């Protein structure tokens, strides 16, 4: 062997290779894992989902964090620090086009931990400062591999953040129309057709995105669960019962399932968006303003939604311009200045 110097394999490179091998071994049956060996700015792996041996085009961008002895918090969740704010923002930008998630691989136990919604976690951490942040993974469970498997598949299918923002915006702007359809279905005679099918179609489209994995749980009938996203299905079902088009009586159970769930989802999204206000103030200030300014029902029960449907303008009292003011104020960084400890220590000496 030559006595001249040769390149050395760093500990980090060994860990990266080991973690990638664990992913391939544990999750390789899900699809294709393509390692990012160059131009790594926060993404280590491109994953493409396979179904019955066929590639689907459904993909996920993955950041992999590995450790020889991963430390868990008291609640059983790993937390990995040292994440630059530029990396957090990079994850957010990618999420508008495709799903992004992170794995934490314990090289000793070969356990794989996953993040939930990495995008929303990242928006909450961005504050315009220079300090690095820590991301949190889902806690230790009975079967980490099963959880990693399910969430990886879900991320491949889930709507992009761009789609979520568009659907959320439509829902907020059309909430009055949606609630009016709801009360009309109970107000008019049973056989009266739903007057504005365009509004009903928009409602289905919004729910298809915002409740993409939970919508089917709202319906008891097997056929309804499989076809709830289809306007044509609901119309045909109504006509099969002898009604002309989508009748009010046929629309009642559909709207009674979707409207309360949609309102609860809008309440959750409002809190989540406002928690990441610094990001949205710079990325989409008009969206942040709309979320802040739009009044939502405090409850999603039948009486509340009927009251809002009949008297929307009185219930939804909006201060015009308050959203723009809020978005402008949110652009100011709330981060504390980094303490120059070393500099002060030198000056003291």
Image (cartoon, rainbow, N blue to C red):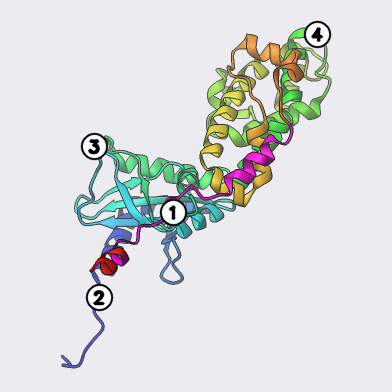
Seen in the picture, residue 237 relative to 164 is either above or below; the reply is above
Left or right of residue 330: residue 245 = right
Gap between marks 1 and 4 measured at Cα? 51 Å
- Residue 333 located within the stretch drawn in magenta: yes
Helix, strand or loop under label 4: loop
Tell me where the magenta segment starts and ends, as one range: 320-343
Left or right of residue 258: residue 177 = right
Residue bearing the label numbered 1: 31
Q: Earlier in the sequence, mark 3 or mark 2?
A: 2
Q: Position of residue 187 (x, y in %)?
A: 77, 8
Give neighbour class at mark 4: few <14, some 14-19, many 20+ (Cα, 10 Å). some
Q: Quadrant of the N terminus?
A: bottom left
**Observer-nearest residue: 85 or 16?**
85
Q: Quadrant of the C terminus?
A: bottom left
Nearer the camera: disc 1 or disc 2 = 2
Q: Position of residue 185 (x, y in %)?
A: 75, 13
Gap between marks 1 and 2 measured at Cα? 29 Å
Residue bearing the label numbered 2: 9
Left or right of residue 58: residue 242 = right
- Residue 251 located within the stretch drawn in magenta: no
Camera sees residue 42 = yes
- The residue most toward the front is 348
Q: Position of residue 329 (x, y in %)?
A: 60, 44
Q: Are marks 2 and 4 in contact (CB under 8 Å)?
A: no
Please give the name of the residue rendered at 74% of the width and 17% of the height, measured from the top-left corner: 314
Q: Earlier in the sequence, mark 1 or mark 2?
A: 2
Please give the name of the residue rendered at 60% of the width and 29% of the height, measured from the top-left corner: 266
Residue bearing the label numbered 4: 188
Left or right of residue 225: residue 189 = right
Residue bearing the label numbered 3: 74
Nearer the camera: disc 4 or disc 3 = 3
């Amino acid at each position: 062997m030559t006595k001249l110097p040769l390149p050395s394999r760093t500990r980090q490179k060994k860990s990266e290779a080991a973690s990638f091998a664990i992913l391939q071994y544990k999750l390789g049956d899900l699809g294709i894992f393509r390692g990012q060996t160059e131009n790594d700015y926060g993404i280590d792996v491109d994953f493409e989902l396979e179904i019955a041996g066929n590639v689907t085009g459904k993909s996920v961008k993955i950041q992999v964090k590995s450790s020889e002895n991963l430390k868990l918090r008291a609640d059983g969740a790993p937390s990995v620090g040292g994440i630059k704010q530029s990396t957090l923002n990079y994850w957010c930008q990618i999420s508008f086009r495709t799903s992004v998630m992170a794995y934490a691989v314990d090289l000793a136990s070969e356990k794989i931990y996953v993040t939930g919604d990495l995008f929303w976690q990242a928006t909450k951490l961005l504050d315009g400062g220079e300090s690095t942040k820590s991301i949190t993974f889902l806690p230790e469970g009975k079967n980490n591999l099963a959880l990693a498997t399910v969430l990886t598949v879900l991320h491949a299918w889930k709507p992009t953040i761009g789609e979520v923002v568009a659907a959320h915006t439509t829902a907020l702007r059309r909430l009055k129309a949606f609630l009016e359809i709801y009360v009309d279905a109970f107000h008019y005679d049973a056989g009266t057709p739903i007057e504005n099918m365009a509004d009903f179609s928009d409602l289905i489209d919004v729910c298809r995105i915002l409740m993409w994995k939970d919508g089917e749980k709202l319906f008891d009938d097997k056929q309804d669960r499989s076809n709830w996203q289809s306007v044509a299905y609901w119309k045909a079902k109504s006509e099969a019962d002898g009604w002309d088009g989508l009748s009010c009586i046929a629309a009642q159970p559909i709207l009674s399932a979707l409207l309360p769930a949609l309102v609860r989802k809008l309440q959750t999204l409002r809190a989540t968006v406002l928690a990441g206000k610094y990001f949205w103030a710079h990325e989409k200030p008009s969206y942040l303003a709309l979320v802040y300014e739009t009044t939502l029902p405090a409850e999603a029960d039948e009486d509340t939604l009927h009251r809002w449907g009949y008297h929307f303008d009185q219930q939804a009292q909006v201060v015009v311009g308050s959203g723009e003011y809020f978005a402008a104020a949110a652009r100011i960084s709330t981060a504390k200045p980094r303490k120059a400890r070393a500099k002060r220590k030198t000056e003291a000496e």
